[in-house]
Image (cartoon, rainbow, N blue to C red):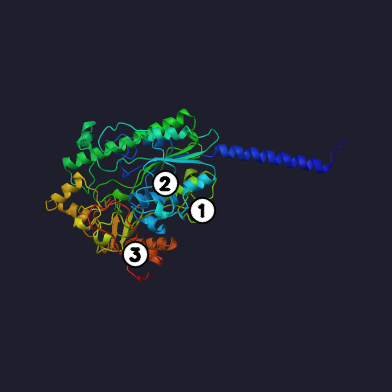
Amino acid sequence: MSIPLFHCLRLSLSAILLLVGLFCLQGASARPNILFCISDDQSYRHTGANGDPVVKTPAFDRVASEGLRFIHAFCDAPTCGPSRSAILTGQSIWRLEEAGNIHSTLPAKFATYTEELRKAGYKVGATGKAWSPGRLEPGGRTENPAGPLYEGKTIDPPFDGIRNIDYAGNFEDFMTEVDADESFCFWLGTSEPHRFYEAGSGVATGKDLSQIVVPAVFPDDELVRSDIADYLVEIEHFDTMVGRAIESLEKRGLLDNTIVVVTSDHGMPFPRAKASLYDLGSRVPLAIRWPDGIESPGRVVDSFVNLSDLAPTFLNAAGVKPPSMMSARSMMDIFSNDETTHRDAAFIAMERHDGCRAGGKGYPCRAIRTADYLYIYNFEPARWPAGSPDPTVCARAIPFGEVDSSPTKTYMMDYSNRYGVAHLAELAFGMRPREELYDIKKDPHQMNNLAGAMGYEDRQKEMRDRLRTHLADTKDPRIVGGKMDWDYYPYYGRIRTEGWKVDPKPVGRQYP
């Protein structure tokens, strides 16, 4: 007996719907997990894979050798809160209002990749230093933007200055709550190697001070070498936690379908590094492993990326469309080894760090970094870039307060008139002109400003114009006009000087 045509159509439709349903279920279970590991204050060079001869970073080195190692990765801002806000939102800091400042807030109107993944069914969590420092409530948030915090596990720290948080243990606790068919996104953020350090911990762990590489912007003194060695100890602590988290994934059989990212929010807490737009402050280590999604793993990527590019990358990898407000660029084409457009520049910015100037004002500046040049535009060159030498105008009650207190800083201040130190101290703490231009190939530590020099006029104009075009295209208020309240937003950090306050916004102030 023949089957009526409409029954055939119904059977065919049912079969199609079944196949589609099975495909969707397979797609959901195959969505990549995400383990985002971020240290606090680590410059690019300080991993084994990136060439440091002393530090031991087997976890970073493994992720780099089995995935991608980026040699031109830059933070969006060399200061904790703004950098982390850019990572979460996939936007440059000049688009984020209060979040462009440290010790501020991240307004809830700015979408984050964590929120978008949660909407798509991901389980989200974080441990250690997530979005921080600042206050969530003024921005309309009740939960850390990186995800619910897991903080139950602790350790006995090997040295003072290392927190007692068992970051990897907290990740393990998170994983016990993840269902077998559930995709997850976890933020593992250590406070290391943020200062302070236990003096002599580097030597105590067997580090040979004669092998320490001292950047050219620091005096080559045994005290400085020991300070760097102590910093490397805390990087190794971070790397140990990353290694344990990777082992946790491996024993569950989840490692190959997990995007593992290892990076830092910005550069090392030393003079002319953190809170500056030079490479020691803005160039960061970045390695990404994902065997199920990266073509030709083991590559060294020389394309320029900003850390804000991670947000749309995570969403694209999960099959989630990034919100239109995300201005950063997904790296999925780098993963597939098929870049559609060459990436030859990174863009970096600063507004207010700790506001260590009269009235709590910042040091607004923008930069473009290419393979050959670094160009910086300083909007307020009459202000002290490293903070005022007068500690009474600084929230931290220290001179040059944008630079963390350290043995290296103290040495450079104490011997600022000594031959061999004076020039370095001036570079670290002195005033800067409106424009700076550095030839990276000839001057990798950016110590010789070529802005205004004969023979570089065309290059300076080219870099200035290119930076300005990018800022205009991404609607930077300092270029296109609009609200520029970074000097006046509330400061939620701890005020350590009696009577210190941020200048109130002038009544009737007009913005172009």
Dividing the picture into quarters, in which one does residue 171 lie?
top left
Quadrant of the image for the N terminus? Answer: top right
The crowd level at tag 1 (other Cα within 10 Å; few <14, some 14-19, many 20+) is some
Q: In front of the other: label 3 or label 2?
A: 2
Q: Earlier along the polypeptide chain: callout 3 or callout 1?
A: 1
Reply above or below: 376 against 134.
below
The answer to whether marks 1 and 2 mark residues whose Cβ atoms lie closer than 8 Å is no
The crowd level at tag 2 (other Cα within 10 Å; few <14, some 14-19, many 20+) is some
Circle number at residue 323: 1
Reply above or below: 57 against 40.
above
Is residue 202 toward the left or the right of residue 70 in the image? left
The crowd level at tag 3 (other Cα within 10 Å; few <14, some 14-19, many 20+) is few
Give coordinates of residue 193: x percent, y percent.
30, 41
Q: Secondary structure at mark 2?
A: loop
The answer to whether marks 3 and 2 mark residues whose Cβ atoms lie closer than 8 Å is no
Say which residue label 2 marks: 144
What whole-number distance in Å separates the C-alpha atoms at marks 1 and 2? 20 Å
Give the residue type that dot 3 points to: Lys
Q: In front of the other: label 1 or label 2?
A: 2
At 29% across and 33% down in the image, what residue appears?
Answer: 157
Q: Earlier along the polypeptide chain: callout 3 or callout 2?
A: 2
Give the residue type that dot 1 points to: Pro
Give coordinates of residue 382: x percent, y percent.
24, 64
Residue at the farthest left position: 418
Circle number at residue 461: 3
The answer to whether marks 3 and 1 mark residues whose Cβ atoms lie closer than 8 Å is no
Give the residue type that dot 2 points to: Asn
Q: Secondary structure at mark 3?
A: helix
Give coordinates of residue 92: x percent, y percent.
41, 55
